[in-house]
């Protein structure tokens, strides 16, 4: 444990930690520990991104650790499924029950009958995305494809500019034209905002393209409300204007791009007049945006995750990713595209995933299909009869919520859940296992929002019998009789494997140095000089920005996700037009007229913190924001309960009437728990499982509903 030498009372220490959450900011935390108890968490004032502040989701994190609601011991169900009635059991008994039941189910149906369900409850390299993969591969369990977040955008981005870290977020202070495209930065990427605000102060124009005039849009110089799911039309029309008006960077295009002639031909049809019809944006605004973007240096685009969540999300990102090369924005410090800087982090994923443990050809089920897989609506040779949920709360975060509820209620399904709390999912478990919080575990964090590596040192001993995911899978491996060396490695040993320490980006950074400093910037040029593609050098097959994508041409549709999950033998395939093109939203409103969006809440982090008192106070009840015209037409007043319905389901929310949303659009943030919702369902009750055009991305923004008073 690293105690910084701060002048506090003798029993008080400060421990360097890292926020564990799935958030681009990856804040460096300082934890105050008094007499073995964490009493305060704060942002590290020295950290260039954290700048001394945590957010409303995490600034009372110690209260999560000491919450009276925490699961502190293994539990066994004693009431009907979903009743939440449990009794405490020993770890020994829990492990034995799990091992025996897995073995029985496997003996009857084969190993694919077991299915892990996990995502990003923690983002730590040890306990996060890949935790458990080695165990389940070794077991021969169904492989779960996890494409909740940015897999469509990553596939599109990688097949256009390659898996490049893109613009350094700290370089944005130098930008003069900043397009925030589908991101509510102040809520979801808070620590990027001071950089954007600084650029704005220095004269940059900030443009926000979003159907909602949220906190961030309100601070922009220009908010462009767009019809959801039509961003591709806007980007294609921008290219049309830039090419027809000769505003492109001829030399950059010639040297560092592939397929310009075909692109010009392709975008000829995508006129601003046509795009205006699709997007609802006036023709002159489309032209102005294209002209200003092409002629202001440095120009940068920040794309949010929500940009991918509709039928044409992949092609939308393809088109946007073409723009910076077309105008030569990459030439300048602070020019280009910011997607996920995580591509700069040399994380050693294979050491955790152990792809070689997996039997080739093992069945893959995408987690969006969980409801269908559990209810038998999906044709399966081997039924799913045992699931293990950790780092996730599918009852809240996955589409087709009611199908998941029906599936989890199945008497013959054996459900194990490891979590901090009795979540909406854990309520249905047969066995619940207690997980440690970040204050009680070792981890090391990459970031998908900046270029800093952060070490997390445990500040306090675990409460009760909670264990980190690393230890959970060591225990399960032992119970199953797996004696591979990986399952013997301690957390300290795992830390040593987390990064490729010999990669150029890690030069000068070691575990020892991180124990001193807590965090370090990757070994990359300074943000005042960083121009990664000033002279091309894109990590694509051609080394250029590929207007015509050779990857899409060669392999068709494929999945690239955050941690390069290795499912090469299970790619969606199917031919894909290698040139950017427009894909319309799928749900066009013939039956259900309103387009529902379910972005992130301000006070919760996905469903995490969704049942914590302070955060619930800040976030309030599940709310649906609706335009005054749409409310009036339906006889809805402010503060009424309204039912939001479609063929897939229904949920009830409090109506908030506001012109912040365009007519025809309604917004209900995701993250509220079912147990706190008026009729016990939340926004994912009405969302579809349907994939977007690339990367098996979700289509949460491509949902139509009707709203009526209750
Ligand atoms: N407070 C908070 N912060 C978070 C999270 C959280 O739960 N809460 N979650 C974290 C995670 S996992 C992620 S992925 C990120 C995501 O953070 P963001 O990338 O900001 O994503 P969202 O909040 O889902 O949506 C952002 C905006 O996209 C808009 N939008 C929706 N559909 C469309 C569309 O078709 N076109 C356009 N132009 N805009 C559209 C919505 O109106 C919304 O304002 O946030 C991270 N940070
Ligand atoms: N409608 C709609 N649905 C969405 C989205 C949306 O915008 N709209 N966003 C999607 C996106 S971008 C994302 S990233 C996903 C997020 O989906 P998830 O990653 O499943 O996110 P959380 O709801 O935060 O669930 C994490 C759970 O893991 C638990 N947990 C945290 N740390 C640990 C640990 O160390 N060990 C164990 N065992 N458990 C732990 C938490 O307590 C919590 O219950 O949701 C997706 N779902
Ligand atoms: S959730 Fe994000 S903004 Fe909040 S403390 Fe964690 S990393 Fe920072
Ligand atoms: Mo996400």
Image (cartoon, rainbow, N blue to C red):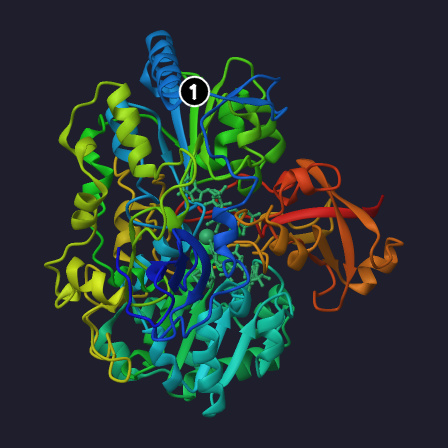
- Residue extending furthest toward the front: 10
Query: Which of 621/693 is in front?
Result: 621
Element assignment for label 1: strand
- In the image, farthest residue toward the top: 108
Task: Identify the residue at horizontal 38%, vertical 63% (top origin).
Answer: 29
Work out whether 123 lies above or below 342. Answer: above
Q: Is residue 430 above or below residue 646?
A: above
Image coordinates for residue 222, horizontal then vertical, percent: 59, 81
For mark 1, what is the residue?
A: 386
Which x, y percent locates residue 427? Answer: 57, 29
Q: In the rendered view of the protein, which quadrant contains the N terminus?
A: bottom left
Closer to us: 58 or 263: 58
Q: Position of residue 602 (x, y in %)?
A: 59, 60
* Image coordinates for residue 409, horizontal then vertical, percent: 59, 21
- Locate the C terminus and report the quarter of the image it occupies: top right
Q: Residues within 10 Å of mark 1 (few under 14, many from 20)?
A: many
Q: In the rendered view, would you say 194 is above or below 616?
A: below
Residue shown at 61% from the left, 17% from the top: 79
């Amino acid at each position: 444990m690293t105690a910084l030498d701060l002048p506090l009372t003798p029993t008080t220490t400060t421990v360097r930690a890292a926020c564990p959450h799935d958030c681009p900011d990856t804040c460096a935390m300082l934890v105050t520990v008094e007499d073995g108890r964490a009493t305060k968490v704060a942002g590290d004032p020295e950290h260039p991104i954290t700048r001394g502040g945590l957010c409303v989701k995490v600034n009372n994190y110690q209260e999560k650790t000491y919450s009276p609601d925490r699961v502190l011991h293994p539990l066994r169900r004693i009431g009907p499924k979903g009743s939440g009635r449990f009794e405490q059991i020993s770890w020994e008994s829990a492990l034995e029950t799990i091992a025996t039941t897995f073995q029985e189910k496997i003996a009857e149906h084969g190993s694919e009958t077991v299915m892990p369900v996990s995502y990003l409850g923690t983002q730590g390299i040890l306990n996060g995305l890949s935790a458990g993969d080695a165990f389940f591969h070794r077991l021969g369990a169904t492989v779960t494809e996890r494409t909740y977040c940015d897999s469509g955008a990553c596939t599109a981005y990688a097949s256009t500019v390659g898996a490049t870290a893109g613009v350094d977020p700290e370089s944005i202070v130098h930008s003069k034209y900043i397009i925030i495209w589908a991101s509510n930065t102040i809520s979801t990427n808070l620590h990027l905002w001071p950089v954007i605000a600084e650029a704005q102060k220095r004269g940059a124009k900030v443009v926000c393209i979003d159907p909602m005039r949220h906190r961030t849009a309100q601070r922009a110089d220009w908010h462009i409300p767009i019809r959801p799911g039509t961003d591709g039309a806007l980007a294609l029309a921008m290219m049309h204007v830039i090419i027809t008006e000769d505003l492109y960077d001829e030399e950059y295009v010639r040297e560092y791009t592939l397929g310009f002639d075909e692109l010009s031909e392709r975008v000829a049809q995508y006129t601003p007049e046509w795009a205006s019809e699709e997007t609802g944006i006036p023709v002159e605004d489309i032209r102005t945006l294209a002209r200003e973007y092409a002629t202001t240096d440095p120009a940068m685009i920040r794309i949010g995750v929500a940009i991918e969540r509709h039928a044409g999300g992949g092609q939308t990102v393809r088109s946007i990713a073409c723009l910076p090369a077309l105008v030569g924005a990459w030439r300048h410090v602070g020019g280009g595209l910011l997607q996920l800087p995580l591509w700069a982090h040399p994380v050693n994923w294979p050491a955790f995933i152990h792809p070689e443990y997996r039997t080739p050809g093992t069945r893959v089920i995408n987690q969006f299909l969980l409801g269908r897989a559990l209810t038998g609506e999906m044709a399966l040779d081997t039924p799913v009869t045992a699931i293990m949920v950790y780092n996730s709360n599918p009852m809240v975060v996955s589409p087709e919520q009611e199908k998941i509820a029906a599936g989890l209620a199945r008497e013959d399904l054996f459900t194990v859940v490891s979590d901090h709390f009795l979540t909406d999912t854990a309520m249905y478990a047969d066995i619940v296992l207690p997980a440690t919080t970040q204050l009680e575990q070792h981890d090391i964090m990459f970031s998908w929002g900046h270029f800093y590596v952060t070490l997390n040192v445990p500040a306090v001993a675990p409460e009760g019998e909670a264990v980190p995911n690393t230890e959970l899978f060591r225990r399960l491996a032992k119970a199953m009789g797996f004696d591979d060396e990986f399952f013997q490695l301690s957390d300290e040993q795992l830390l040593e494997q987390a990064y490729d320490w010999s990669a150029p980006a890690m030069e000068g950074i070691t575990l020892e140095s991180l124990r001193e400093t807590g965090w370090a910037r990757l070994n990359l040029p300074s943000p005042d000089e960083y121009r990664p593609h000033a002279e091309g050098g894109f990590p694509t097959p051609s080394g250029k920005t590929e207007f015509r994508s050779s990857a899409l041409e060669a392999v068709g549709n494929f999945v690239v996700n955050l941690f390069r999950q290795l499912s090469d033998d299970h790619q969606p395939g199917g031919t894909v037009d290698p040139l950017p093109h427009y894909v319309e939203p799928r749900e066009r409103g013939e039956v259900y007229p309103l387009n529902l969006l379910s972005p992130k809440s301000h006070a919760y982090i996905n469903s995490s913190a969704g049942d914590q008192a302070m955060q619930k106070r800040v976030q309030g009840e599940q709310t649906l924001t609706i335009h005054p015209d749409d409310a009036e037409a339906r006889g809805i007043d402010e503060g009424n309960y309204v039912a939001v319905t479609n063929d897939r389901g229904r949920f009830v929310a409090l109506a908030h009437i506001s012109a912040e949303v365009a007519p025809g659009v309604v917004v209900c943030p995701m993250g509220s728990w079912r147990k706190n919702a008026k009729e016990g369902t939340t926004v994912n009750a009405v969302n579809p499982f349907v994939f977007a055009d690339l990367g098996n991305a979700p289509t949460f923004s491509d949902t139509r509903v009707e709203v009526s008073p209750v």
